[in-house]
Amino acid sequence: MSPAAAVRVSGSGIEARFRLAWSGFALDAALQLPGRGVSALFGHSGSGKTTLLRCLAGLERATDGYLAVRGEVWQDDVRGVYVPTHRRPLGYVFQEASLFPHLSVRRNLEFGLKRVAAAERRVSLDHAIALLGIEPLLERMPERLSGGERQRVAIARALATSPRLLLMDEPLAALDAQRKAEILPYLERLHGELDIPVVYVSHAPEEVARLADHVVLLRDGRVLASGAIDEVMPRLDLPFAHDEEAFVVVDAQVAGRDERFALTRLEFAGLPLWITGLDAPLGAQVRARVLARDVSLALAERHDSSILNVLPARVVSLDDASPGRTLVRLDVAGRALLARITTRSAVQMGIAPGMDLFAQVKGVALLR
Amino acid sequence: MTNAADFAAIRLTLELAAVTTAILLVVGTPVAWWLARTRSRMKGVIGAVVALPLVLPPSVIGFYLLVTMGPQGPVGQLTQALGLGVLPFTFAGLVVGSVFYSLPFVVQPLQQAFEAIGERPLEVAATLRAGALDTFFTVVLPLACPGFVTAAVLGFAHTVGEFGVVLMIGGNIPEKTRVVSVQIYDHVEALEYAQAHWLSAGMVAFSFLVLLLLYSRKRGGVR
Amino acid sequence: MEPSMKAPLVRLLCAAALLSIFPAKAAEVSVAVAANFTAPMQRIAAEFERDTGHKVQLAFGATGKFYAQIRNGAPFELFLAADDATPMKLEQEGATVAGSRFTYAIGKLVLWSPKPGLVDGKGEVLKRGAFAHLSIANPKTAPYGAAAMDVLRKLGLADTLAAKLVTGENIAQAHQFVASGNAELGFVALSQVWADGRLTSGSAWLVPGDLHEPIRQDAVILAAGRDKPAARALADYLRGAKAVAIIKSHGYGR
């Protein structure tokens, strides 16, 4: 056992390989995650996402494991390297806030901070406090906080240790919709302001769509798919596309506005995509969501309908989603879109892979 | 109503209980911690050994202590080899006997307190860079504080109430091994009922107050 | 704890109930016996039962405790104490059958060590003081302890040896301290180290009777035994030749 993370390898991402066998459950996962942005571990309960996260933290000791984070080896059982949790520069946010009940909010925040060498501190306490908006809570005891407040303190507490990797285990799962809405913006700010890779466990597609850049889909302790969110979500061979609420995310730039009709123009794959409202500032990088059921297809570009966004597309593949329905994966100037149409329409229109047509996008929702 | 010998016995008893409790808290804490956390098969065995004094008659404990700490016993051989002489008839011997006798009264409340804390706070501390010892002193100790109070009070009170073990290994030496319970026994044997009453009533009052304190504190609900 | 406390109580109540139903046929006698007299009394009781057909129930314990129990209504009919003071006290308090008190045995004090040769035939070992602990019975409560203190005072050693004294609650414990080796030597009852006319082990000095007050062990018929022929019969039997022989063989005098 190595006492510290002395071993270095090349690589700026996260490379992990864990094997673990309990009675009734086995984890056998190999992962390559980017060294920046948010990676979501997605799957049903029992799929092994929390166990995988705990392995990353060293809270669970996988056998035959390997873990390197941005060039630092934290576990390599072949070479007998294992850095215990408290020597790993990570932050961990549990599903329940798990604040120390005997310490005030301030002392909770300082608990981790005090144990980090001054030279290693890159996130100041004030910054963490401001980021999570918990300034007014500092002198309170945890028992006098609401669920949402507690979770914000827990996130700030983890950030205050200047982690080189932030692990979050469904930090919103224990909260009601209102509290979730209260915290999500903070998580997005975190994402925008700090250069800390985040691994985020979730079973809620909503959260994943808003926060994740990279998605790992887990099932029965194995990795089903792993990749950028706009690559994984439209894959017809994965369960996402078959969800009633199936969607793709669209990262785009705010390119213009129509003040008169209160519309905002996004630049998407070099094509204009109009959304209602004028909330986003010009030039901002935004993420929008397009539901598969909101996309219809037309063989010719039509201007006689109420649909604002009509994009030229090519059919990539088809899949019979459920009786009477067909899912069509489209390529729009190199970006993927999903359309869900009736099977009869698909047959009558003679839709087949390679076919050029037009996607009529009925609705685009801004996620962030 | 009372005399110097009674007061000497009271002082000695309090000294014995204080020293015993202090040692028990130091020795009992790691034992309780291990019992609370281990998944080892030895847990049952060690737990049973710790609980033995609960069910064994003090005369059995006293008898074996007398034999093992005596000049021919294994403990006696060891203490003699270390130049400490033998332990029976000494204050140190009473402390050793009391530590064993009151062990479950300290270990069990501590074990329960540690178990009640659960895994999570320890994991949280680890993710906040705290090592095992650090976590123990900054997280476990404060969270288990009510357990420590209970353990200390029970250990102290039980040692004060000890009789059989002291009787067996003490030798009834004034100011060295003659504690209150033995003094009461002597008064009864000598038909000095007034003095026996005086001391016995004191013991009843003391024990009642201790338990009252303990139970009303629990009802108040610190946690 | 509780069941074991209850069982004798239930038995006692049953016995009491039976006694009240068949008073005339009661051929059972309940006896409280000083712990040091356990072995000879068991033999005597067996002989008595065989010779008379009466049944004997023996309870062994500390004399002081028996006193407290008898004063609080314990249904003993005959009491064999470890001293003479307690039966006399009971008699003065009217708890006995008048005129029934007698000395059934005289204890012999011996200075004993399990180590052969440690104790010489004259007790000189006490004067040399080459030992860490001298065990005696509690002089305040045990007659053998009081006698031992008599001896030490007569020899002028009471003060010099005070720091080396360890005190057993009774003569049995005083013996145990020595037997376990925790005290090198001690004043014990001859009956404890004497069997079949010789010392069972170690070395001993039989303390001359003029060095201490005689250790008289008195018996008395208690109020509960007033109209019980069996109690009277056992009291008489204790003074008979057969019983006396047994008592002497156990190291007691008469």
Image: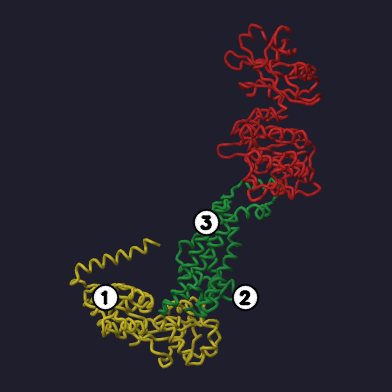
Chain colours: A red, B green, C yellow
Q: Quadrant of residue B14?
A: bottom right
The amino acid at mark 3 is Gly
- For marks 2 and 3, give the one nearer the viewer: 3
Dot 2 or dot 3, earlier in sequence: 3
- For marks 1 and 3, give the one nearer the viewer: 1
The amino acid at mark 1 is Ala
Asked if the residue at tag 3 contacts the one at tag 2, i.e. Cβ–Cβ closer than 8 Å, the answer is no
- Residue at disc 2, secondary structure: loop
What residue is shown at x 45% (from left), y 66% (from top)? B57
Q: Residue furthest front?
A: A260
Q: Quadrant of residue A10?
A: top right
Chain letter of the residue carrying label 1: C
Chain letter of the residue carrying label 3: B
Find residue A137 and name its label: none
Residue A80 shows up from this direction: no
The amino acid at mark 2 is Gly
What residue is shown at x 63% (from left), y 14% (from top)? A326
Q: Which residue is mark 1?
A: C224
Residue A322 to residue A85: above or below: above
Q: Residues within 10 Å of mark 2 (few under 14, many from 20)?
A: few
Q: Residues within 10 Å of mark 3 (few under 14, many from 20)?
A: some
Give me the C-alpha separation between circle 1 and circle 3.
50 Å
